Image: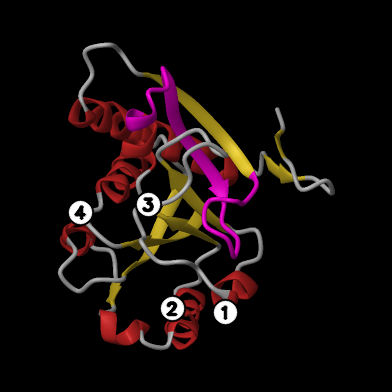
Amino acid sequence: MLKLGVLISGSGTNLQAIIDAIEQSALSAQVVLVVSSRADAYGLTRAEQAGIPSLALTSADYVDPLAADERIAAALKEAQAEYIVMAGYMRLVREPLLKAFPNRIINLHPALLPSFPGEHGIADAFAYGVKLTGVSVHFANAVYDQGAIIAQAPVVIEEDDTLESLEAKIHAVEHVLYPRVLQLLAQGRVVMGDNGKVSITS
């Protein structure tokens, strides 16, 4: 069973999708710790309701971001986390976390990378007028949204879509794709090649 640490900053809907997938036996994993960059994040309530230990930081803790990541890495190591899952975590992961969990930090992005990276991927794709966007799951590295891509799923932007309806469609795909990718990790089927590209074994 794969032991996961989950990093959040907000409502924690993807955390909930992971919890639900575990309860439904669709994901062979255990969330051993939830870390939030905000003490008022609703995701902490979700963790508490599921009986998952949590660690809540505040903006003051991030005045020294390296010290914050050292603290997070130590807590995740103590919880025996094997992979770290960023689920709406609005902070850049830095060297202490990347060194503690090399090629074991996973991020979710609401666009088809490398298109529309950054904090506003959904709004940027909608404003640009593309007809196809989607969701990417990738390994995190020291640069926002530039780690090796593990999986992607498309979302068609219809003529009558609004930004709000597109956001809802994107989130619905996230809640399916993320647990599915984590199950591939649990099965040992995600392989990082020497060329820096990811392959999925059968």
Callout in the foreground (3, 2): 3
Work out which residue is located at the far top of the displayed protein and give it. 159
Q: Secondary structure at mark 2?
A: helix
Work out which residue is located at the far right of the displayed protein and give it. 194
Give the vertical position of 127 relative to 72 (above or below).
above
User: Magenta segment range?
Assistant: 126-148
Q: Earlier in the sequence, mark 1 or mark 3?
A: 1
Give the vertical position of 25 relative to 35 (above or below).
above
- Where is residue 36? Give x, y as percent: 30, 69
Callout in the foreground (3, 4): 3
- Give the CA distance from mark 2 to mark 1: 9 Å
Please tell me how crowded label 1 is: few (under 14), some (14-19), or many (20+) other residues with Cα within 10 Å: some
Amino acid bearing label 1: Pro
Q: Quadrant of the C terminus?
A: top right
Reading the image, the residue beneath label 1 is 96
Callout in the foreground (1, 3): 3
Q: Secondary structure at mark 1?
A: helix
| Numbered circle sitting on residue 72 | 2
- Give the CA distance from mark 3 to mark 2: 22 Å
Please tell me how crowded label 2 is: few (under 14), some (14-19), or many (20+) other residues with Cα within 10 Å: many
Amino acid bearing label 3: Glu
Q: How is the image coloured?
A: secondary structure
Q: Earlier in the sequence, mark 4 or mark 1?
A: 4
- Where is residue 133? Give x, y as percent: 43, 26
- Where is residue 1? Give x, y as percent: 51, 52
Residue 144 highlighted magenta (yes or no): yes
Reading the image, the residue beneath label 4 is 11
| Numbered circle sitting on residue 119 | 3
- Give the CA distance from mark 4 to mark 1: 26 Å
Residue at coordinates 38% horizontally, 58% vertically from top-left?
A: 31
Q: Earlier in the sequence, mark 3 or mark 2?
A: 2
Q: Earlier in the sequence, mark 4 or mark 2?
A: 4
